[in-house]
Each structure stands twice: as structure tokens, then as C-alpha cells.
Image (tube, rainbow, N blue to C red):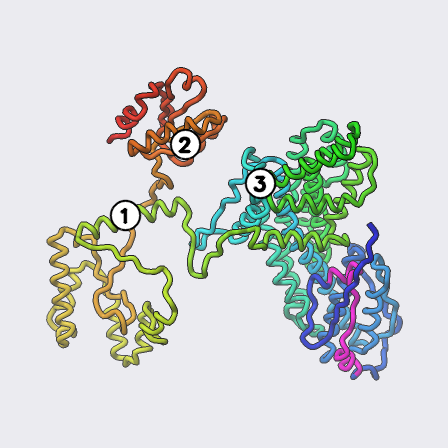
Amino acid sequence: MAEKLQVFVTTLGGKGSSLSSSSVYAIANGLAQVRIDSSAFSRLATFDNRTPTIKDYQFNFSNHLTTEESRAFVAVLLNKLLIISGSACIRTVLPVRIAEALNTKNSQSLEIESLDLTEEEAATLETLGLTSSMYGVFALLDHQTAALSTIADAVAALSCDALKADVTAFNLMDSGDGYTAKDEIGVCGDMKVLLNGSKLTGKVEINAVSKIPKIHGCLREQAKLVHSKTRVELNSAVKAGKGGPGSVAGAAGMVRTALLPLAAALWDLGTCSFDRSKSNLYSMGSDDLRSSLGGLFEKKCPSNDSLKNEFKLFSELVFEGEENYGKLAHQVNVLLGLVWKVVAWEAIIAYVSLEGAELNESKSTEVNGEEKAKVDKKSEKKRKVVMGKGTSVMIQLIKNRLSKLDACGSSGLLEKWVEDLLSFMDPKDIEFDSLLIKVKEIVESNETRRLPKLPKGTRDFAKEQMAIRKKAFSIIEDVFERHGATALDTPVFELRETLMGKYGEDSKLIFDLADQVEEKGLTIEAADKIGDFVKERGSPLELLSKLKSEGSEFLDNNASVDALNDLEILFKALDKSKCIDKVTFDLSLARGLDYYTGVIYEAVFKGGAQTTRATKTEVLVSILGDDLIQAAELASELWDAKIKAEYLVAKRPDKHFRHAEESKIPWMLMVGERQVKEGTVRLKDVESKAEDVIQRGSVVEELRRRLSP
């Protein structure tokens, strides 16, 4: 397991250089060393001739900070000193001494030797120290939360396979109307990619699985918020004693708006992950395995009560004042550490549930090598077929990691599995970055996703929306056809040069009236008159009468008189057609004046909410068993009779009932073994729950009678 740790170098103080949360995390954990850019030394050297007046200044670190957090604090402090080095009187010795402390080989400690400082240097350290400690912990939270968001999805997908869970909650779609949560949609998309091709999921309804989109989506949202704020704060230039983003007041606001929702999201994620772990334990097939792993789980995994207590402690600190905000950030980091352990345990239990046969095999009699190889190859091939493409890759990554362990007894092997996988899921582990990169490759791979990307400006319509749209368009088409209209189909997309050539570079098809006043170069007087007219809206004949009344300025222009006469003919025709009450004359409607010069129409929907069915199915053919041939035969008879029908083949009656109720299908034809033997079917009214037994040969006739209005 011993591999050489690769150490990177982070350069600070250079022109255009910036400090990222990932760099802070790497420095804090000894994964990166600090180098001060030569340009910073040039700026610092300007003040090297200043005489220090404060002897043996000691760097003090808060007792509540861990070594990792203290190192993160010092990394941020160093960057802040270098940012203001051109304006503050900072000598070279101060940042150099800090960099030397960070670059010591032992990342588990931090000691900065005392040194003599000028009064301005001491004041700068005191001021920057108030916020740098908090921003250092924020950087750790930012880096680890982003990683947790990705890994938690992959681990949850493993649980879905292990639990054989119903994953219909991941079918959430973006409606395009602005009312769907983008991060929830993103989680659903990634979960579908990870579980793509799985034959295990879709059977068991589990609450902790159904909540994944909302809970994981919430963590994504809060992780983005923390990242956007931290990225700015790490590199903001604030002078000592000045207010601004880096001041104590600014930090207080950041805590309130970022840490509170992040802590709540972490608590929810940990609780949900813990619940899936327990469900996996309960569903484990081997009693011995369940007992052994359950004992380790109860002993070593943080419980829901532990998560609750940490969140409660954090909540109490919120009201203790700004001086405790550094401790507050530390407390969220503690909560994050517990959640990481819970997610790691979920991965362990899901893996053992899916691959636990290896532990049981260690107890059984060893078969010869050739037979064992055949068994392993066969079982591996089967897993590749039934598991999701993403989850099967996760399983293989874990197996590769565990393959480096020495073989031992089943009890000892299980404990080694647990110990090593807890380490594997730790962001500090040498192989963690490879795991994270692989998971990202899975969810971002077009080859795996195979989902079409929506062109900008377009949208998908869900089945319920499509039902409404089809009904609306059918009404419109019926009206148009009744009046002799014919259909014309044009491309959804048009070539840019076609549109630009037809309408001109500066032409627009839809205008705000204020735009047109400005663009057409109208006088103020003309614009005021137009402003008065566009306020007019009402009954067509009444408003027309007002516009044609004596003294109206419209009567002074021949073109406007012709237009009013045309409108009068139109409105009188509408009146005789008995539909004038459905029309409003609105002078505020306007389109591009260089293209639309006639009457324009705008349709408005009026009415309350309506219950809409996504399907027009009238009958559900329910085969209680696995006889697909019987389903095809009966459904075909209904289709030939022009009866809208669909069939479902499943052994569980509740699945048939649920599908009929959710799809609002009015009738069910139920056929089981008894009905096949007796030559009958059960006809069920889904709404009233009433059932009748009818002869198989009279199904079509009976349904026609009941479906006829």
C-alpha cells in the first residue's frame, strides 16, 4: 500500500496568481508546498530597512482549531500578506518565516518561530488573523464539500443497486418554465447515468432513496454558494483596519448566509445516507455477514443522534456573537467529517451486500483453482449484466483497492475491508483523487450518458404537458379546419443567414413600444399622443366608436380612416357571428413596425385548473403472472376493436392497481391462472372499485357497451 506521495508546489504573490480552496487543502495536509513569487520579493524588499519595535512576537492559534485548520489559516494569511505587500509596510522576513513553517516535512504540526516585528506588521497580522482563520476553514469546507457531493451520488447509486430500490424518483425532468430546481435535475441525471443498464433497481420503494434528488440537490446548491463566496474571500485585498469583504462584519454576513444552510444540508445528507446503510444491513442475505458487519457498524459509524448533536451544537454557536464565528466554521468542519464517515460506511455496506459472497467463500471448502476461476468468471459476467454501468465501475475500483490486502480469515478480512475502505473514502488518502476523477468521468461521459443535449432556447415537455398541448392544438386545428384553413409545416430551426437576409441586421420581430418610439425617431409630441392611445383597451365596438367620434385625430388621416373602416367591418362580422364577447380591442399590442403593418392577434387562455390525463388509455390489460402471450392476444383484440388499451405483465396486483390509478385509466381487465382455467376475465371499474366476472369471448362487446357515452 505504500506509495510515494506526490507533492505539488503552489506559487503565491505573483501577478495574476490566486489561491484556490484546493490549494489551501493541499497545503494544509502537506500535499503541496508554498513558493513565494519573485515579484513579491521585489515588493517586500522596499520595506526591509524598517526597524522592528516589537520583540519576539508569538503566533498564537486558537485552541479549537485542528492542525489542518491552523495550517489552512496560515496559508490564507500568507496569501493576504502578499496581496497587500505593495501597499502595507511588510518586510520580507515575515512571509518567508510563514512559508518555511508551512513547508516543514511534518504536516501534522505547525510551529512558527517568534520574530521581531514592526508595529504596522503586528497590527496587520492581528487584523488579517480575525478573518483568515475563518476563510481557511471555509476553503477546507469548499474543497471537501464539492468532493462529497460527487462521491455521495456514486455511493447512493451503489445502495440503489444493493437494495433493488425503486428509482422512479430520478425521472424528474426540467419543465423549462423556471419552476424546477436545477440541482435536483442534475442529481437525477447523474443517478440515471450511474445506474444506466441496471437490472437490479426498480422493485422496492425506499424513502431514503426517494429523497436523494432533494437532499443531494440541496447539498450541491449550498456547495456552489460556499465556493462562490470562498473564491472571492481568499483573494480579496483588504487593508488592515478597513472594512469590506475581508472585514469582521463581512465575515459575519458570510457565516450567516453560507454556513447555516450548508450545515443543514450536511445533516440531511448524513441522516439519509445512514438510513440507506441500515436498510442495506437489514436486507443482507447472510445472517453471519449481517451480524459481523452490523456489530462494526454500530461501533464505528456515527449515528443519526451524533449528527443531530453536532448540528445542535453548531446552531447554539450561531447566537454567541461574531467572536465565535471561527469556532462556528470549525464546528461545520467537524460535522462534515462525520458525514464523510457515514457516506464511507454506506459504501462499505453496499459493497459487502453486493460482493459479500467472497467473505462467505473464505469459510467454505476451497475448490480447485480451475473450477474457482470458472465460478469467478461466471459471477463477474453476471454482475456486469445486472448492475449499472457506473456502479459496476465503482465496484471494480473498490475491488482493485481491496485486492492489495493480505488474505486472512473471514472475520479478519471483513475488518480489513472496513478499515481500508474508510481510508479509501478519506479525501486525504493518496488514491482518493483517482477515485474522484473516475466518478466524474462516469457522470460526465457522453458515451455513458447517451442523453441528447437540449439546444439553447428549447425545452422538453413532460407527458402531462404534452397532453395539455395536444388538446389545445387539437381545438385550434378543429376551429381552423372548420373555417377552411389548410396546414403548413415549416422547419423548427432556420438558417441564420436566411433570417438576417430577410429582415435585415438591425430588424427585430417583437418590440417593446418604447423601443419603437426611440428607434423610429418620433417627436416628443407624437410619442405622447401614442402613449395616450396605447392605454386604450376594451370592448371592440365601444372603443371603435370612441376612436371614430367627432374630433378624433384618427379622422384627419386617410390611412387611419381606412383602417378604422376595416376594423368596423371586422367587429360587426364578429358581432353577427355571436363571438364579439370573446374579443378585446387592445391598442397596446405592437410588433416590429417595419414588418407587421396590419392587425395582430393574441390568444389568451381563460379558465381554472383542469385534471389532465397523460394517456388516453381506456383499458389496462392486467396479466397477473408472466404470460406475455396472453397479454398480447387480449390487447390485440381490443386494438382491433378500436379500443385504446395497454397491457402490464406482473405478479403483484398492487403494481397493476397503482399503475391504473396513477395513469387515471378507467377500466382494468384482470387475468390470472384461475381466469385462464375458467375462460373468464375480471372487469374492474378503477374509480368505484366494483368488479364483474365476464366470459372471455364477450370482452370486446362488454367493453364497447360500458365505454359508449
Instruction: Reply above or below: 200 against 492.
Output: above
Disc on res. 474: 1
- Residue 644 or 334: which is nearer the viewer? 644
Name which residue type carries label 1: Ser
Which region shows up in magenta? 24-45
Count of marks placed on residues:
3
- Residue 161 or 515: which is nearer the viewer? 161
Residue tagged by mark 3?
198
Residue 217 lies in the magenta-colored region: no
Secondary structure category for the residue under label 1:
helix
- Residue 301 or 419: which is nearer the viewer? 419
Which quarter of the picture shows residue 312?
Answer: top right
Q: Earlier in the sequence, mark 1 or mark 2?
A: 1
Q: Residues within 10 Å of mark 2 (few under 14, many from 20)?
A: some
Q: CA distance from mark 2 to mark 3?
A: 23 Å
Disc on res. 647: 2
Q: CA distance from mark 3 to mark 1?
A: 39 Å
Name which residue type carries label 2: Tyr
